Amino acid sequence: MSVRDIVSIGDPVLRERARELTAEELRSPEIQRLIDDLIETRRAADGAGLAANQIGVAVRIAVAEVDGVNPRYPYKPPIPLTVIVNPTIEPVSDENVEINEGCLSLPDLRGVVRRHVEVRLRYLDREGHRHEEIRRGLTAGTFQHEVDHLDGIMVVDRADPRTLMTWEQFDRHHRDEFVARITAFAERVGS
């Protein structure tokens, strides 16, 4: 396992739709190493999730994990390590929430994005087993963010451009209000 470089906005790999993997490819040592590297890279960067194209490999794999207090996202509820391969996502309800999101491929930039509160996530795990789950709240937002990456969509595409800000300005002017609002939201929806 190794920590890989995370590519930044402007790299073409972030704008292409990642390709699906076959069962044979998923079982290969190369793809299993890629998954291990995604996990290690996400942990080293303190992200909530990371998609394969963020480390320069355009295949439909992403990981999500929030354990303990994440210094980038201390308000996010725990997410056990989840590897999603060939994921699809669809809204379950019409309810939306505004989330001030950051992204490891957008160093020092955040923006307000509307996300579905409840989604159905279908995917294969790293062993090739099928899963279908309902994800809610901020956790649903995390998975929508990662599937967006796999579709070549970034936060700046979904955010109101008037809400884009640096982390410094977020901390200075917006953090307290956002954390209070999103914590109340998370308590209301349960995740």
Image (cartoon, rainbow, N blue to C red):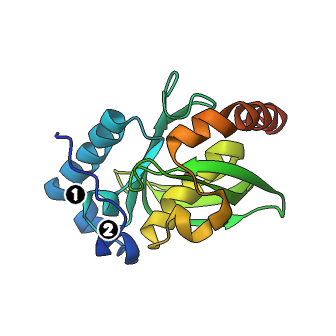
Task: Indicate the position of residue 10 as horizontal and vertical percent values.
Answer: 33, 70
Would you place residue 75 above or below residue 5 in this image? Answer: above
86 or 38, nearer to the observer? 38
Of the 4 image quadrants, the one containing the N terminus is top left
Residue occupying the far top of the picture: 68
Q: Which residue is mark 1?
A: 31
10 Å crowding of disc 2: few (<14), some (14-19), many (20+): some
Q: Nearer the viewer, mark 2 or mark 1?
A: 2
Would you place residue 85 above or below residue 189 in this image? Answer: below
Would you place residue 128 above or below residue 1 in this image? Answer: below
SS label for mark 1: helix
Tell which circle, 2 or 1, labels the residue nearer the N-terminal end. 1
Q: Which residue is mark 2?
A: 59
Task: Indicate the position of residue 183 as horizontal and vertical percent values.
Answer: 75, 31
- Amino acid type of the residue tagged 1 in the rendering: Ile
Q: Is residue 87 visible?
A: no
